[in-house]
Image (tube, rainbow, N blue to C red):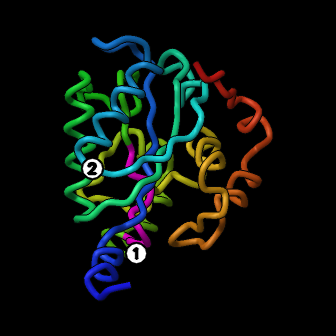
């Protein structure tokens, strides 16, 4: 392999993104919206995207709205994490996402879960946000990007789709595999995750 190809390969980061939605958008149902969002992401990043199955998951926190359709995507990105975060926010806005409510119903949610092995803003900053009580996480919005996603290890609706595509991927902080984090979830959370039949 040439020096140029090696340089290009190392400049790309393996990325995992969680997708979700529980409200209809201008293009249709949550499942249809997720499909269009993935197509848009593919165009904007010029990359091959591997997608999990779609899953129906109960809204979290309970009572905040209808059930969600969730999925996960894996791809490689050449650029900075903040650049990709802006792409994700732009796509959310394109499909009508208004970022005015934390953890409320929405037409589209694109969460950056993992960006290579990056930890941001620092290991201490990551841990401080991860360890906040859930009540504070609902009310507060982080002022800086947090990587990896601080609630990745706690959510069946994230880990279930990841099990479908990257069960052996290791968490950048804990070192646990996706399959190990998924096994640590309460059985009731795993049972609540229902795969949708492919069209």
Location of residue 190 in the rendering, given as x and y in whole percent from the top left corner? 73, 38
Question: Image quadrant for the N terminus?
Answer: bottom left
Furthest residue toward right: 187
Mark 1 or 2, nearer chain start: 2
SS for callout 2: loop
Q: Which residue is found at the position 21% from the left and 30% from the top?
A: 93
- In magenta, the rendered stretch is 111-119
**Residue tagged by mark 2?**
46
Displayed quadrant of residue 109: top left
Furthest residue toward front: 1
**Residue tagged by mark 1?**
124
Q: Are marks 1 and 2 in contact (CB under 8 Å)?
A: no
Displayed quadrant of residue 146: bottom left
Q: Is residue 43 above or below residue 20?
A: below
119 and 10: which is toward the camera:
10
**Nearest-to-viewer mark from 1 and 2:** 2
Q: Which residue is found at the position 41% from the left and 54% from the top?
A: 75
SS for callout 1: helix
Count of numbered tags: 2
In three-dimensional space, the C-alpha distance between marks 1 and 2, rounded to whole angstroms, equals: 34 Å
78 and 178: which is toward the camera:
78
Residue 116 covered by magenta stretch: yes
Q: Is residue 70 above or below residue 179?
A: above
19 and 76: which is toward the camera:
76
Q: Is residue 146 above or below residue 161?
A: below
Question: In the visual, does 66 lie left or right of 186?
Answer: left
């Amino acid at each position: 392999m040439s020096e140029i190809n090696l340089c290009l390969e190392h400049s790309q980061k393996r990325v995992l993104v969680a997708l979700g939605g529980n409200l209809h958008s201008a293009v249709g149902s949550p499942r249809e919206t997720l499909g269009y969002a993935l197509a848009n992401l593919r165009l904007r990043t010029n990359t091959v995207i591997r997608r999990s199955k779609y899953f129906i998951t109960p809204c979290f926190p309970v009572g905040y709205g209808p059930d969600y359709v969730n999925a996960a995507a894996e791809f490689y990105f050449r650029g900075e994490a903040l650049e990709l975060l802006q792409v994700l926010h732009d796509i959310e806005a394109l499909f009508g996402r208004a970022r005015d409510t934390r953890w409320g119903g929405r037409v589209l949610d694109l969460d950056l879960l993992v960006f290579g092995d990056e930890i941001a803003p620092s290991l201490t900053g990551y841990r401080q946000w991860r360890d906040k009580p859930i009540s504070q996480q609902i009310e507060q919005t982080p002022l800086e990007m947090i990587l990896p996603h601080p609630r990745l290890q706690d959510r069946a609706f994230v880990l279930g789709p990841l099990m479908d595509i990257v069960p052996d991927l290791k968490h950048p902080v804990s070192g646990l595999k996706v399959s190990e984090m998924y096994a640590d979830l309460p059985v009731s959370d795993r049972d609540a995750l229902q795969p949708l039949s492919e069209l």
